Image (spheres, helix red, strand yellow):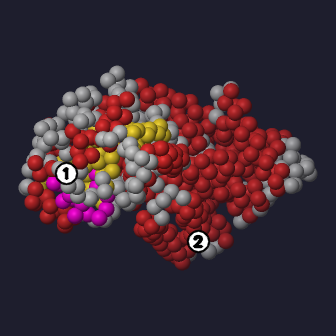
């Protein structure tokens, strides 16, 4: 590997103790973003600048040794993995054309322009000019932490940019492989066959095997523990290593691993929070620090040739990436902020660009000399400052637009209550259901309540209950969600739950049912039936035993005339939220009704998830269909009206028990809100 210095030898770094070096890095990761935040600049720029200042080409406080390079490589791999995890996979698959179009344009335009400039301006050969263009035709998601912090990762334009990364990087690295091989004179049929077979086997193998293994693991180890995190890490780095064996870079394997695990790691769960926490606090900052330590401002004094190369690279990467974003934005109707965000996010250059120029230098590609290396380093410095700044500006605009569109004067603040019992075996999975339904932008806590009947040991039972609720609070804290815990003493458990709902202005009730029959049972049992009869809020009653992230599909039961219920839009919105946040599709079964009406209703209600509605003739036909199509990993959901509401039918009283005999997996009954339901406009699509 060539040295990046031109004339100046690096200063001897005074810090060699590993504990001191790691401690210094932690201080820098803390202080640099906070300082730049005061000046309304992206925090990641601070880490890059500090890396340049203390690195071997600055003050020489730290050497970019093998440890820093290792942590930097791990940080880049981790960054690509998190980016793939946070993609809305349903929307990504449904609108794959956006990612493909932008990925192709973001590669082809820079590649074509760079090749011409390399031949005409820099007088390179065709092979060398192609490799010169590949330096900036790929891109690194350097500014991804910015859109992650602003919460706009699910914006369609941002998703297209992130998705296009895998295409641009793959194509750029293929150009590298072809050019280097051609220089060595071994560009024959065997090379192409080996490359095609290796890539095909890798992509198909990861896409098919990883979800199966992960679903099995999560089902066995369904408690939130460090085992799940270690499994995810093992999967990530195994896929990254296998990608290198297949002939592509580690980042391609990391991105594909994230896509394969996307549906199995809910965005609102504690596991995702742990993944993001470790990345944002440790690995990704080390990647940014490593990038900064590459920078050598002394190359400015290296002569006109270095400045010409650097200037050409900087102008071309800015112009061509913006043109690709503009063409894509015009084709799909994106706003100016979205176009600027796409351009800024795709301008980032770091590891891939450096790897291409270094490998080209080592392989002896004509024109790839020390001036070329220094020019690339200078280009990395400039785009490392420009890219986050553009994305920050665009992201702020997207946040303002999103908040303005989401505002509705009729919208109620979401308040969720989860009644729990000390004896409950599946309390964490029930709380996971509430976490899945919770609006991630909401600052409101989830409420839990446990009702204790008075008696001789009331004080002891209250203490036991409060300790139990405290454990649930600690569990939810792993997802950075506050839990307000309530303990009540009441002879009537249903009355205690209803009173807690009234006092805390609850809008959504999430209750668990063990499926056991009761002597006084009507639908679920004496307590649950009383709560449903005495409340008007949206209620979900479910038997949730398996982890929600292992759900493969939602089977939605729609009773006759339920679409005419006043609270149906909110109930359907809730079901579609479950589908979106578990990354699955909806298979609707319409009993004695029109599937066209449900198709129209679903098209009007947010969010946008894949769904299909099929008709069944009557209840007997429904039971037969359920027995035939329902699998253990399906989540069966029934929208059921309360007694005497529109859509109610006597069969609904026994339906939950029948469903419990059909599936050993999860099922939920959703009761729409009645009489004082919120304005349905808040659940409808704006376009």
**658 over 496 or under it: above or below:** below
**Res 424 → quadrant:** bottom left
The magenta stretch is: 654-668
Residue drawn at (18%, 42%) of the image? 641
In front of the other: 242 or 18 = 18
Classify residue 127 by image quadrant.
Answer: bottom right
Question: In the shown orientation, is residue 454 left or right of residue 273?
Answer: left
> Is 132 inside the magenta-drawn segment?
no
Question: Residue at image x 17%, y 54%?
Answer: 655
Residue 227 position (above or below residue 380) = below
Nearer-N-terminus badge (1/2):
2
Q: Mark 1 highlights which residue?
A: 520
Reply yes or no: does residue 665 show up in magenta.
Answer: yes
Q: Residue 482 carries which label?
A: none
Q: Position of residue 65 (x, y in %)?
A: 80, 57
Residue 67, x across and y down, in percent: 76, 59
Q: Which of 378 and 668 is in front in this view?
A: 668
How dense is the environment of label 2, judged by Cα within 10 Å: few (below 14), some, or many (20 and up)?
some
Give me the residue at 33% from left, 47% from top.
Answer: 511
Q: Which of 680 and 664 is in front in this view?
A: 664
In the rendered image, the vertical position of residue 306 relative to residue 635, given as above or below:
above
Q: In this view, does 154 lie above or below 128?
A: above
Whole-number angstrom distance, CA of label 1 to CA of label 2: 64 Å
Q: Residue 268: x, y in percent? A: 46, 46
- Image quadrant containing the C terminus: top left
């Amino acid at each position: 590997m060539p040295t990046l210095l031109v004339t100046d030898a690096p200063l001897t770094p005074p810090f060699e103790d590993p504990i001191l070096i790691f401690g210094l890095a932690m201080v820098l990761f803390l202080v640099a973003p906070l300082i730049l935040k005061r000046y309304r600049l992206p925090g990641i720029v601070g880490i890059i600048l500090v890396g340049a200042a203390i690195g071997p080409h600055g003050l020489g406080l730290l050497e970019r040794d093998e440890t820093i390079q290792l942590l930097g490589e791990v940080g880049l791999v981790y960054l690509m993995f998190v980016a793939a995890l946070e993609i809305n996979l349903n929307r990504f698959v449904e609108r794959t054309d956006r990612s493909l179009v932008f990925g192709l344009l973001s590669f082809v335009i820079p590649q074509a322009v760079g090749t011409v400039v390399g031949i005409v301006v820099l007088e390179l050969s065709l092979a060398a000019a192609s490799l010169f263009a590949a330096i900036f035709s790929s891109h690194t998601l350097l500014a991804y932490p910015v859109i992650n912090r602003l919460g706009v990762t699910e914006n369609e334009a941002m998703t297209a940019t992130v998705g296009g990364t895998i295409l641009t990087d793959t194509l750029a690295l293929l150009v590298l492989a072809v050019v280097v091989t051609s220089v060595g004179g071994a560009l024959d049929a065997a090379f192409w066959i080996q490359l095609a077979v290796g890539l095909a086997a890798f992509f198909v193998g990861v896409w098919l095997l990883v979800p199966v293994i992960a679903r099995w693991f999560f089902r066995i180890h369904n408690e939130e523990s460090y085992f799940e995190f270690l499994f995810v890490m093992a999967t990530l780095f195994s896929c990254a290593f296998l990608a290198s064996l297949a002939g592509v870079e580690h980042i391609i394997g990391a991105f594909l691993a994230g896509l394969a695990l996307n549906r199995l790691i809910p965005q609102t769960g504690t596991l995702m929070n742990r993944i993001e926490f470790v990345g944002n606090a440790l690995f990704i900052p080390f990647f940014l620090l490593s990038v900064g330590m590459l920078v050598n401002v002394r190359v400015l004094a290296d002569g006109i040739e270095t400045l010409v190369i650097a200037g050409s690279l900087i102008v071309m990467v800015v112009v061509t990436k913006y043109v690709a974003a503009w063409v894509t934005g015009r084709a799909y109707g994106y706003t100016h902020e979205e176009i600027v965000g796409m351009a800024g996010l795709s301008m980032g250059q770091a590891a891939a660009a450096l790897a291409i120029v270094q490998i080209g230098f080592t392989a002896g590609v004509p024109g790839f000399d020390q001036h070329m290396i220094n020019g690339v380093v200078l280009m990395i410095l400039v785009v490392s400052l420009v890219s986050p700044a553009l994305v920050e500006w665009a992201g702020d605009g997207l946040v303002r637009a999103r908040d303005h569109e989401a505002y509705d004067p009729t919208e109620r603040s979401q308040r969720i209550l989860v009644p729990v019992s000390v004896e409950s075996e599946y309390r964490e999975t029930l709380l996971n259901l509430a976490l899945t339904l919770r609006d991630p932008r909401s600052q409101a806590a989830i409420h839990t309540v446990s009702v204790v009947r008075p008696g001789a040991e009331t004080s002891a039972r209250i203490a036991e209950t409060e300790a139990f609720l405290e454990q649930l609070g600690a569990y939810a804290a792993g997802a950075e969600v506050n839990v307000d815990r309530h303990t009540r003493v009441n002879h009537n458990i249903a009355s205690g739950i209803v009173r807690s709902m009234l006092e805390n202005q609850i809008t959504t009730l999430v209750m668990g049912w063990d499926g056991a029959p009761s002597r006084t049972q009507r639908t679920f049992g004496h307590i649950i039936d009383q709560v449903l009869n005495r409340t008007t809020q949206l209620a979900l009653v479910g038997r949730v035993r398996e982890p929600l992230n292992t759900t493969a599909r939602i089977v939605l039961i729609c009773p006759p005339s339920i679409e005419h219920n006043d609270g149906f839009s909110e109930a359907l919105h809730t079901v579609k939220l479950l589908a979106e946040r578990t990354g699955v599709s909806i298979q609707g079964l319409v009993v004695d009704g029109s599937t066209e009406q449900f198709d129209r209703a679903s098209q009007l209600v947010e969010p946008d998830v894949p769904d299909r509605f099929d008709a069944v003739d009557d209840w007997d036909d429904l039971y037969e269909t359920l027995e035939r199509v329902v699998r253990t990993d399906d989540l069966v959901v029934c929208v059921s009206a309360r007694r005497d509401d529109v859509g109610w039918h006597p069969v609904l009283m026994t339906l939950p028990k029948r469903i419990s005999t059909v599936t050993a997996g999860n099922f939920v009954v959703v009761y729409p809100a009645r009489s004082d339901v919120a304005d349905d406009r808040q659940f409808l699509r704006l376009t």
